[in-house]
Image (cartoon, rainbow, N blue to C red):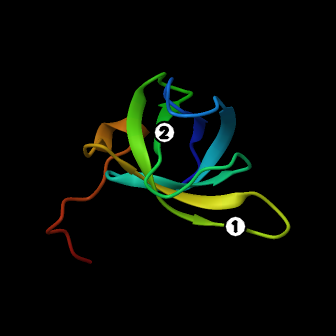
């Protein structure tokens, strides 16, 4: 699911950067985004939903560098934030 987000570092967490991007995958626990900025596993970031303005703290889980484009970065929210994406997720016991 593609959601426009602004990704940036909290103040005091290293060089500041702000990057507008879109999600590749979303969940109640985090997202997968494409980032040009340099980030590292376990680094804290702030993710802001550009539609709602809501901001959540997250941490980088993994970074997969691509030789021809931006890195694919998995982030996990500091606490689950299902409402951040403004979509309804199916309940855990839901089956097809």
Q: Can residue 81 be seen at all in this image of the molecule?
A: yes
- Residue closer to the observer: 81 or 90: 81
- Residue closer to the observer: 47 or 4: 47
Q: Farthest residue in the bottom direction?
A: 96
- Residue closer to the observer: 88 or 65: 65
Mark with earlier residue (2, 1)? 2
Q: Where residue 45 is drawn, which disc sits there?
A: 2
Q: Farthest residue in the left direction?
A: 93
Residue, disc 1: 65
Q: Secondary structure at mark 2?
A: strand
Residue at the image position 63 percent from the left and 62 percent from the top: 72
65 sits left or right of 28 in the view: right
Q: Position of residue 4 (x, y in %)?
A: 61, 38
How many numbered marks, from 0 up? 2
Can you say whether 78 is above or below 67 in the image? above
Residue at the image position 85 percent from the left and 67 percent from the top: 68
Residue at the image position 18 percent from the left and 65 percent from the top: 92
- Residue closer to the observer: 93 or 40: 40
Q: Farthest residue in the right direction?
A: 68
36 sits left or right of 24 in the view: right
Rendered image quadrant of residue 24: bottom right
> Between marks 2 and 1, how big is the CA–CA gap?
18 Å
């Amino acid at each position: 699911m593609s959601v426009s987000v602004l990704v940036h570092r909290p103040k005091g967490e290293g060089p500041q950067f702000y990057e507008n991007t879109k999600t590749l995958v979303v969940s109640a626990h985090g997202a997968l985004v494409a980032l040009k900025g340099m980030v590292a596993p376990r680094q804290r970031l702030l993710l802001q939903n550009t539609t709602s303005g809501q901001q959540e703290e997250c941490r980088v889980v993994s970074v997969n560098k691509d030789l021809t484009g931006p890195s694919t970065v998995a982030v996990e929210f500091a606490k689950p934030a299902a409402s951040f994406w403004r979509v309804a997720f199916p309940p855990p016991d839901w089956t097809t």
